Each structure stands twice: as C-alpha cells, then as structure tokens.
Image: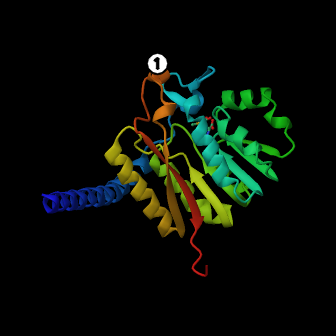
Amino acid sequence: MFIYYELLYENITKFLTICCRTGVQAELVLGTIARKAQETADSHGHYLEDRVSFSEDKLMDTESKAVMMAWEKPLMEAHAKAICARGGHILNIGFGMGLVDTAIQQYNPVSHTIVEAHPEVYDRMLRNGWGEKENVKILFGRWQDLLPQFGCYDGIFFDTYGEYYEDLREFHQHLPKLLRPGGVYSFFNGLCGDNAFFHVVYCNLVSLELENLGYATQLIPLPVKDCLAEDVWAGVRHKYWQLDIYYLPVCQYLDDTE
Ligand SMILES: C[S@@+](CC[C@H](N)C(=O)[O-])C[C@H]1O[C@@H](n2cnc3c(N)ncnc32)[C@H](O)[C@@H]1O
C-alpha cells in the first residue's frame, strides 16, 4: 500500500512538473506573439489619465479596481527589508499608498528615490510631506520616460499598476545598469495572483528570464491568508490576489567568483 502511494505521489509530481514546464514554454511562445501585437498597440492605457480615489484601506481606479490595498502592508514591509539589506541608495517605482516607502524610511537609506506617474498620487505624496524628507528624491512621470535620470542603486523595488508582464520584463532589461553588484532587486509578485497554476508558471518564467540576465531569484514564501479578512474585497471589482502563500522575490546578481 505504502509503495502504491509513493508511486502515485511520484507520478503526480512528475505530471505537475511537466504541466508547469509546458506552461512556461507556452508563455515564452505566446509572450513573443503578444510582444509583437503590443508593438502596434498602445499598451499604456488610460489609468494614468483617469481619476483615482483614496480611502483608509485602499486606492481605487475609476473602474472600482484596486490600485493598492492596505492588506499588503506586511508584504511591503518584507519587500522593504529585503531591498534595504545593504542600506545605501534605494529606488522604488510606484508610490501607491506609500506603504513600501514608509517601510523603506525605517531603514534610513542614504538616498531614497521614488518614481510615481499618477498626478493625483503625486499630489498626495507632496501634501503628506514626502517632498520635504531629507533623503527622499521624487521623480514624477512614467519610469519608462525617466530612465535617463536614474542612478545606480543598492536596492530596487518595482510595483506599478495598469501595466503588463511585458513592462516588468522591459524593466528587467535595464537592471544591469541600475543595480549595483551585490544589490537586491524585488518586485510585487502579483503575477496571475488569482490562479494557483498560472502563478507557478509565471514564478518559473520570471525566475528563468532573470536568470538569463544573470540574476538568481529566491522566492520566499509568506503566508497571507490571515491578511485577507472576508470583507477585504468589499466594493472591489477584481480580487487580484486569491492565494494563501505570497512568494516574495529576492533577486541578486549571480557572481560566479563567489
Ligand atoms: C500598486 S501601486 C504601488 C504600491 C506601493 N508599493 C505601496 O507600497 O503602496 C502602483 C503605483 O504605480 C504607479 N504607476 C503606474 N504606472 C507607472 C509608471 N509607468 N511609472 C511610475 N509609476 C507608475 C501608480 O500610479 C501607483 O501609484
């Protein structure tokens, strides 16, 4: 009986591995097709031109989709801890509710650059005094347009809204210029956060793509079930996260000499 279960378990594991590999391969092929299609379309929709609304526990767009939610606070704190591990110069892309930036400030970095593209989010940052913090530099605009103004950083966090996997991938192409050797890069890993299977596919895909760029990615499991009370999604049109474990990416340059 025991041998039977062991065999069954082994075969299920093999099957899931094959499914996942097939998923990654399919995404690689379909991603190439999507990239081609996107070249002819304007991918950067209307979010940045539309109004947003703030409440205590969320930031919403005009379609009642959540741009950012307070339940992510512990995740943002964990991201901040990871990217501030070496202190120094920190870059964060996407201010949202300022959760990750508030956590970054606790580590007192030498410099803390924040990139934000939405005019109302930017205004709110200024009203809340972010422009007066000594070590903070705010860059207003889309990261894509501000790239020439970026420096070199010890820690980088990326978390935008209204963008696609292609944009994240494009950002990754710039990492070698932006991240100092030994620095830490992380991003909000909400990739297909409403589907366990595709989430695993995307976790594998992004790790593989970062590896091709010379980065090793560790995915640190963080249980999030307790952060998601029943009423968290009240009034939100899309539950962008439905999984019990969040895999926090910690990416570092693969140094062969180490
Ligand atoms: C999910 S929120 C970030 C939440 C943030 N990590 C926090 O802790 O509150 C995404 C933010 O990225 C901004 N954003 C969207 N596209 C952007 C772009 N291309 N460049 C810079 N910021 C962008 C949005 O306006 C929004 O404020």
222 relative to 181, above or below: above
204 relative to 245, above or below: below
Q: Residue at x 47, y 20 (%)?
A: 231
- Residue 175 occupies quadrant: bottom right
Q: Which residue is mark 1?
A: 234
Task: Please indicate whether residue 165 sits to the left or right of residue 137 in the image.
Answer: left
Kind of residue indicated by mark 1:
Ala
Displayed-image quarter of ligand 1: top right
Nearer the observer, 43 or 18 = 18
Task: Please indicate whether residue 89 sits to the left or right of residue 54 in the image.
Answer: right
- Residue 258 occupies quadrant: bottom right
225 relative to 59, above or below: below
The N terminus lies in quadrant: bottom left
* Colour scheme shown: rainbow
- Residue 19 occupies quadrant: bottom left
Nearer the observer, 153 or 171 = 153
How many neighbours does mark 1 have within 10 angstroms: few (below 14), some (14-19), or many (20 or more)? few
